[in-house]
Amino acid sequence: MNYKMLNISKNLNRADSVAAWRLCMGCGACKWACPNHAITLKNIPSKGIRPLVNEKKCQQCGACVVVCPGKGLEHKVFSKEKINELSDGWGPILDLYEGYASDDNIRYMGSSGGIATAIALYAVEKAGFTGVLHTKTDPNCSIVNVPTYSKSRNEIIEACGSRYAPASPCQDFDKIKQTEGLSLFIGKPCDCAAMRKACVRDPELSKRVGLIVSIFCAGTPNTSGTIAILKEMGIKDPSFVNLFRYRGNGWPGLATACGDTGKFDEVASKNVKIEKDGCRTMTYSHAWGEILTKHVPLRCRLCPDSAGEFADIAVGDAWYRDLQNDSGRSLVLIRTEKGRNFYQQKDFEKYITLENTKYCALPDSQSSVYNKRCHIWGRLKVMMLLNLPIPIYRNMNLEKNWKSIPFRRKIMTYLGTVKRVVQKKWKLPIKIE
């Protein structure tokens, strides 16, 4: 990309322009959409998964940005059956439940009750789905994610658990398109939004997508965040680690690193515990709250959709619960009729236990992401006034959310955004290479 032609690159007319202006979400949909195979993806530890465009192959067709959730999101008309009390801040929700995997072992292994894994198992074993496109740990590097298409119980369970690192499952949409029968797609909210855009562009893909499931997401930390966890654990080189869990094996579980413990350094941090087998652990609250959140990129901080608004079903932690006296629970948001029909099928309760819950359980559990949403409109206005490219949101009630916060917080948001634009040099595009 010609970084001198800023007036052109600000149009966000190609995937690398989106990335250069820090608006890429790393979903990988652009790679799938490019008809000329001009895009490759690179995981840059300090930035995330980003597209690289081959100038010789690129025909400037714009297909890559048609499916790009980083460029913007748009809701259509909500169903009349939506829960009105929640729609302004959380998107369309038809039904709200709490739930967990009926299988105790899956519930224990899962990060928050094993719901996503249980849905995947039910889809393949009972609902007639051929397989599941989702994310798992890279067999060659335990702190890196790779997309995978799973057809068996063992394959699905192997991918169980949260992965707080970049993932690009959308690059493999063709694994759904080229597989006979229906497939389940599980991804972050931005991945699910990209899938919706891709289905509009490609009717053949749309026919193969049986259900879209989103996990809640407060932002995807760059790989540098995981490296920072390892460093605090006394692990200098990720290659020393052969197993890394961000959480799970209990709710919320511990961040855990195991491997060649003889190469691990002594631990100076009081936040790290050395287990009997030599593995290093730290609490989820420290790993996420004190380390990983510092490595969340700009685009995630400008994203209003933390709860999978474009999915059929969305799941995420029921944080309002007493974690010490519970084995793991998720809120389950039924967002479409397709999602409602899925959970009403025969034998669903053998895989997932659902209970009715009050509407307040959602904002009580996810107050931090709603608070972020309320500030986005102000941040975007400042960036627009400073002539920075911004994502375009339609029918997402962001101005209404903004108006709900106190005047003092509005001023702090304005000033804080200006400060970050200057300090972090957001007025200049970054090179992706």
Image (cartoon, rainbow, N blue to C red):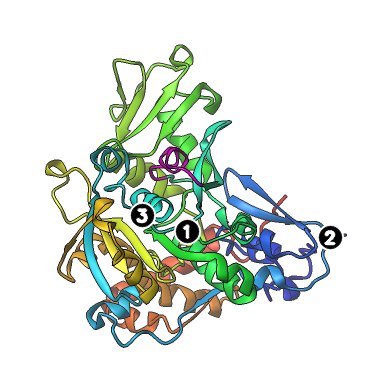
In this rendering, is residue 267 above or below 355?
A: above
Q: Is residue 19 left or right of 119 when viewed as pictured?
A: right
195 falls in the magenta region = no
Going 53% across and 50% down the picture, which residue do you hit? 167
Mark drawn on residue 401: none
Residue 428: percent from left, percent from top: 65, 63
Identify residue for label 2: 55
Residue 119: give its label: 3
**In this rendering, is residue 279 above or below 433?**
above
Q: Which quadrant of the structure image shows residue 388? A: bottom right
Left or right of 106 in this view: 74: right
Q: Residue at x 32, y 43 (%)?
A: 110
Residue type marked 2 = Glu
Residue 161 on the magenta segment: yes
Q: Are marks 3 and 1 in contact (CB under 8 Å)?
A: yes
In this rendering, is residue 423 above or below 79?
above
User: Is residue 263 at least partly visible in the picture?
Assistant: yes
Picture coordinates of residue 56, whole percent (x, y) = 88, 59
Which quadrant, please, contains the N terminus? bottom right
Does label 2 or label 3 sit earlier along the sequence? 2
